[in-house]
Image: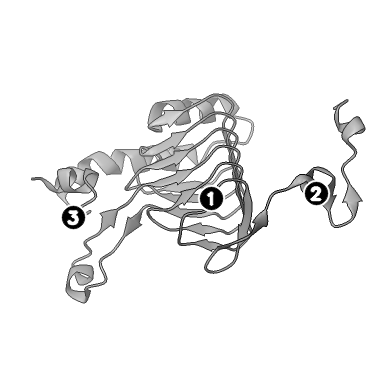
């Protein structure tokens, strides 16, 4: 079994293997070029995501810079996704993102991990476990999502959280480690901030 085959099967492997590097390096060069684009070059941004990402739906937008170990090759975006500045995806494994997910600035999503054994870690070996983020989730600024985690649809991850375990649908979760705080409820359809009410009538005219 080659190191590349070990990588895609989620086994411990050598990420510095020549076969892997030959495939990865051109993608990193393309990512460097992507990060030089001007904010106004929206068509070029879309073209990069369509050509390089494993999947990319319609209406996705990334504020640059964007960082990814494989340039986004193992990123699966649905439609209508927004990523703020400095989204970092350690995409040695796969990241699956549902429609209308929002990423705050400085979010880190890691699919790669290293063995706890010092000898293996000293050889720079690693393994990958995929991450799944459900549709309409909101990942707050500077949140960190570790390998193998699943975040449910409509979930909200508070700023600065470290997500080490699965998060269910329709909840607000925050902290280090990230924990469910409460369900998203009818109260949240009435108030948007403390005691400030949502003006649904005015919003309907936007």
Q: Is residue 37 left or right of residue 72?
A: right
Q: Secondary structure at mark 2?
A: helix
Label 1 neighbourhood size at 10 Å, few (<14), some (14-19), many (20+)? some
Q: Secondary structure at mark 1?
A: loop
| Tag 1 residue | 168
Q: Is residue 52 left or right of residue 200?
A: left
Q: Which mark is first along the chain, 1 or 2?
A: 1
Residue contact between numbered discs 2 and 1, judged by CB atoms under 8 Å: no
Residue 187's tag is 2
Label 2 neighbourhood size at 10 Å, few (<14), some (14-19), many (20+)? few
Residue at 56% x, 43% y is 64
User: How far apart, in angstroms, are the residues tagged by discs 2 and 3?
Assistant: 48 Å
Instruction: Work out whether residue 146 can be spotted.
Output: yes
Residue at 54% x, 36% y is 37
**Could you say where residue 198 lies in the image, as x and y percent from the top left?**
87, 42
| Tag 3 residue | 13
Outermost residue to the bottom: 118
Query: In the depicted view, which residue is nearer to us: 164 or 86?
Result: 164
User: How far apart, in angstroms, are the residues tagged by discs 2 and 1?
Assistant: 19 Å
């Amino acid at each position: 079994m080659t190191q590349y085959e070990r990588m895609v099967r989620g086994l411990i492997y050598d990420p510095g293997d020549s076969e892997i590097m030959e495939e990865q390096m051109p993608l990193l060069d393309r990512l460097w070029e992507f990060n030089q684009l001007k904010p106004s070059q929206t068509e070029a941004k879309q073209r990069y995501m369509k050509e390089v990402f494993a999947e990319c739906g319609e209406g996705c937008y990334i504020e640059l810079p964007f960082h990814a170990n494989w340039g986004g090759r193992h990123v699966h975006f649905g439609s209508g996704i927004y990523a703020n500045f400095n989204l970092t995806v350690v995409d040695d494994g796969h990241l699956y993102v549902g429609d209308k997910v929002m990423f705050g600035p400085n979010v880190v999503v890691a699919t790669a991990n290293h063995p706890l054994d010092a000898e293996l870690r000293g050889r720079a070996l690693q393994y990958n476990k995929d991450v799944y983020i459900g549709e309409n989730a909101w990942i707050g600024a500077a949140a960190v999502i570790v390998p193998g985690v699943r975040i449910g649809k409509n979930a909200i991850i508070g700023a600065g959280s470290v997500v080490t375990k699965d998060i269910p649908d329709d909840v607000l979760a925050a902290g280090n480690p990230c924990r469910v705080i409460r369900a998203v409820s009818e109260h949240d359809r009435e108030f948007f901030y403390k005691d400030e009410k949502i003006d649904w009538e005015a919003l309907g005219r936007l």
